[in-house]
Image (tube, rainbow, N blue to C red):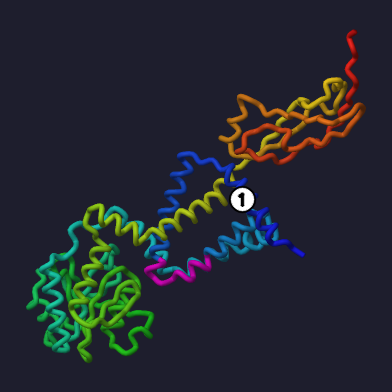
Amino acid sequence: MLNFASISQTALKSFLTFAQKITLGYGDILDIAIVALLIFFVLTLFKKTRSMPILFGILLLVFLYAFSAFLKLRLTQTIFNALFGVFLIIIAVVFQKELRRFFELIGVIGLKRKFYTPSEGAFKTITRAVEYLAKNKMGAIIVFPGNENIDRHLEGGIKLEGKVSRPLILSLFDSSSPGHDGAIIVEKDRIRKFAVHLPFAENTEAVRRYGTRHRAALGLAEITDAFVIVVSEEKGTISIANNKRFETILNTNELEKLLHNFFEAKFPQKGFYNFQKWLKDNIWTILSSLAIASSLWLLFTYQASVIQRKYALPLQFKGLNPEYIVEDYNPEDIVIIFSGRESDFKLIENQMPKISVDLSGVDLGWHNVVIKKDFIAFPSVLTLVKIEPEIVKVRLVKLQSTD
């Protein structure tokens, strides 16, 4: 019967021994940091698109592959290597939209628009206009872009660049206006375009009790980080769509609060408090990114850079009875194979390892002495792979008296 407790202890001991041998240079730290940053973007994107269960499935497969590589499970590794190319194609097909958004997010790093948040007066004007539209059952769609570029998802529309005002918003959604069925795009304190057509949502179940306006609002929120307000022409309700989420809200006070939260998250003001809030909101994503990046570094970079070297080392004897001497031993040198990184071997260039054979309790005559790992003094960052040969023939004779 398998002793799982013993196996677990052995595995943990092996892992701790392996961890103690890991050496990190400045280049390795930078390497892990860059990969962790990319993984952070991926995890953030998957959280927004509600695709985390699929991502966890992928991470489980990666973990299984890493586990098989660590324990050198050849059959499992062979199967994973054979399916690796097919697996990449499946990921590209399944996550086509997510991958496109990921590269778009990478493209806007450092290009966030400054002073993009509407003024407090604009917030009040918009919420009061929405309140009037809902009360009078006038359909409307109001779009607030986030960090991502939404232009390629829009169709039609007329450029306006008009200052946000209640009369202007109400006139644009008046039923007599030719563009009242479209959306308006609000940037800062201005209405950039009106009569804009948005893409329809794929998740029709979420808006099945509503009309095409709501499906269009959710459609843009499925593929970008925009915040969309939609007013129902039939029910007079106010709903919002953001990050694939659709919900109907109770009043304009809640709407104003949600708008403030959205712009605070997308365009935070500089300050230590905002950094603390951002760090608190993303601490688990940051830690997960670092853990995954470190694991990938260990699996692919660290293991790939491990090399082996042979050294022929002479024997030294200790623990010998004072009345005995070593008359002969064979072979005179033992070949030791170490594994480690190139930088690790620099530790033994100036001072070669020594093999100190303990002959305590060994009597006269020929003896087969087993060369143990404990007999060899070498840096802990290196791993002893093999000893050739493991047995040395040693002959002890009595020391001749000079009297």
Residue under label 1, please give it: 15
Give, as a single range, the part of the protein colored magenta.
46-58
Residue 294 is one of the magenta-drawn residues:
no
Q: Quadrant of residue 172?
A: bottom left
Q: In the image, what residue occupies the spot 52% across and 63% down?
A: 59
User: Which quadrant, please, contains the C terminus?
Assistant: top right
Q: Seen from this angle, which residue lies furthest top?
A: 403
Q: Seen from this angle, which residue lies furthest right?
A: 365
In depth, the one of 212 and 314 nearer the eye is 314
Which SS does the magenta portion mostly show?
A: helix
Determine whether the residue tagged by mark 1 lies in a helix, strand or loop: helix
Q: Amino acid at mark 1?
A: Phe
136 in relation to 379, above or below: below
Give the image location of residue 285, x and y in percent.
41, 60
Give the image location of residue 80, x and y in percent.
62, 62
Residue 50 is one of the magenta-drawn residues:
yes
Q: In the image, what residue occupies the spot 55% across and 47% down?
A: 301
364 on left or right of 121:
right
Give the image location of residue 280, x and y in percent.
34, 59
Q: Residues within 10 Å of mark 1 (few under 14, many from 20)?
A: few
136 on left or right of 287:
left
Q: In the image, what residue occupies the spot 11% across and 87% down?
A: 176
Q: Quadrant of residue 328?
A: top right
